[in-house]
Amino acid sequence: MKRAWAFLRRFASHPGALAGLIILLILLGAAIFAPSLAPFDPADNDAGPQLSAPDATYWFGVDLHGRDIFSRVLWGGRYSLAVGVATICLALVFGSGVGIFLGFIGGKIDAIGSRAIDVLLGFPAVVLAILVVVVLGVGLINVAIAVALAQVPRFARVVRSDVLVVKQLPFIEAAHSLGAGSARIMLRHLLPNIVPTLVVLGTLNLGEAILQTATLSFLGLGAQPPTSEWGAMLNDGRDYMRYAPWMMLFPGLALFLASMSVNLIGDRLSQLLDPRSLRR
Amino acid sequence: MRYALRRIVGIVPVLFCTWTIVFAVMQIIPGDPVNLMLAGVPASETVRANERHRLGLDRPLGERYVTFLWRAAQGDFGDSYRSRQPVTRLIAEQAGATLQLAAGGLVVAVVLGLGLGLIAGLKPNSWRDTLCMTIALAGVSMPSFWIGMLLIYVFGMTLAWVPIASSGVMGLILPSITVGLFIAGGFARLVRASIIDAMAQDYVRTASAKGLTRSRVVLKHALRNAIIPPITLLGIQIAVLIGGAVVTENVFARPGLGTMLVDAVLNKDLPLVQGLVVYTTAAYVIINLIVDLLYGVIDPRVRAERLA
């Protein structure tokens, strides 16, 4: 507990990281408590006069269908943030699975696997995600899966190179000679030792995951209207930019703040946790 | 030279893997291609059977795979379901627009990234450093479609400085910034780290001690050594550039490969999707090869290592 507190203080001693943490907590709070915070129902078509500008009642203005944009942005956080986090979790599970396996097993399988990872890394993430959407169909959950799969090779590569280092350490040899099986060594000895890498990797990629899922929704491949997902809201707003710029301003700002705060936190975490940046 | 040859031969398996993956993906897509092609137009069973035969769908999987590879190697990906035109020709028609955009984005990324990175890295922990790095971080954190919309709103609509929809050079400015900003952010961060490293090296101190001007020390000695990691990043970021083109073309309603890809996906125009994916990957692999070969040109140490 004391160590956690000390870590938090060290983390927060960096002004950028502290700002990021505060912004993220506000956004998370807004998303979690959206049902009680939002002044209007996000799907209510009669919340206010269509396309009216931001004022005291409608903080972020009203959209084309008469829905309150502030309420929709609050609710939208539930989709965008949750999908972003879910995406990263999925990518972490598969990425670290593949990475640990390849790094541990070595030899021919590792050589082929690593080559395949290099090829997959060559696919532009958005194109790869689009390809997955082609197979799975349009929808927010499919987009999350698609973005996660697009991130797997990146995670696998870093985890693999980490495992190659950890694998050489004496305690792994000790576990071997005590008769521990491969599965046990991978799960109980290798995995816990790469947790810092996973945390850093996860946070550093979370911002991008949030942006990418929003991008696919923006392109019409993810969340479908009337869902108040931020990317889909921006897509709604693009045709009315001239008359109602607030329709695209606020969901975009929310996305920007979400990804910026996560990136600030990730930068600081990698300074504190990543052994590679310590060595430098 | 031998190194270059070996690298060129090395891209063959990569392309082969990509084609295989693309072929496999196309096989698992649910739905009969003939139905997709007819797009709901009623057709008799004979017509369908003829179509299937024409597309070679009645052949066994292995044979189809070999045919696919053979044709792909010749750049033939069949005809688009929608327009009934050869995929390669459709792509060639649109490639120019996207290349212009990518080139514009690259220029923005390099100029902005190098500028921000140098200003920040030459005076670490100063207020200029903080400012530049905040801009860089904002660059990687902003959704590019939002940047595009903001640019259109501010410079295209409110100030009306640049035309929004124009095929000329002026029309390329805003889309290039949209594509380039994200890459510029990452590039700037790496340039900064790299230049801080380089400035602490002995050879930089020697150069300064020789009495060279600061700009000469920075540009000829420090930057030349510091530029390798950022250039590598740029090579990898080509993928981001391609992805960014998809979004940017969509926002600015520009024609191009990105617009084509999204349309092809929404219309389930499989041969077109196939062709686009294969060509983008090929472009990526080849660009990275060029970047790799460029190291030798920039850095004599790399050249020596490769000759050894």
Image (cartoon, coloured by chain):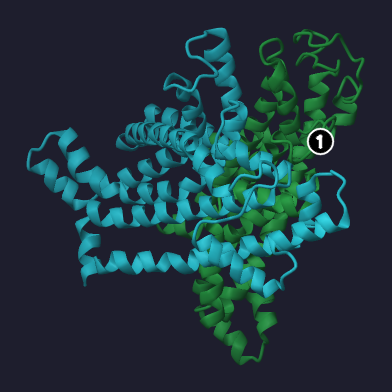
Q: Is residue A17 visible?
A: no
Tell me: residue A101, above or below residue B218. Answer: below
Quadrant where the C terminus of chain B sits is bottom left
Side of B132 where A242 appears, left or right = right
* Dot 1 alpha-carbon crowd within 10 angstroms: few under 14, some 14 to 19, many 20 or more: some
Tell me: residue A145, above or below residue A58. Answer: below
Residue B198 location in percent, x, y? 27, 48
Residue B269 location in percent, x, y? 70, 47
Three-letter code for the amino acid on which mark 1 is drawn: Gln
Which one of the lettered chains is coloured cyan? B
SS at mark 1 in the image = loop
Q: Residue at x 30, y 57 (%)?
A: B293
Residue A274 location in percent, x, y? 52, 57
Q: Quadrant of residue A268?
A: top right
Q: Quadrant of residue B124?
A: top left
Side of A89 where A107 appears, left or right = left
Which one of the lettered chains is coloured green? A
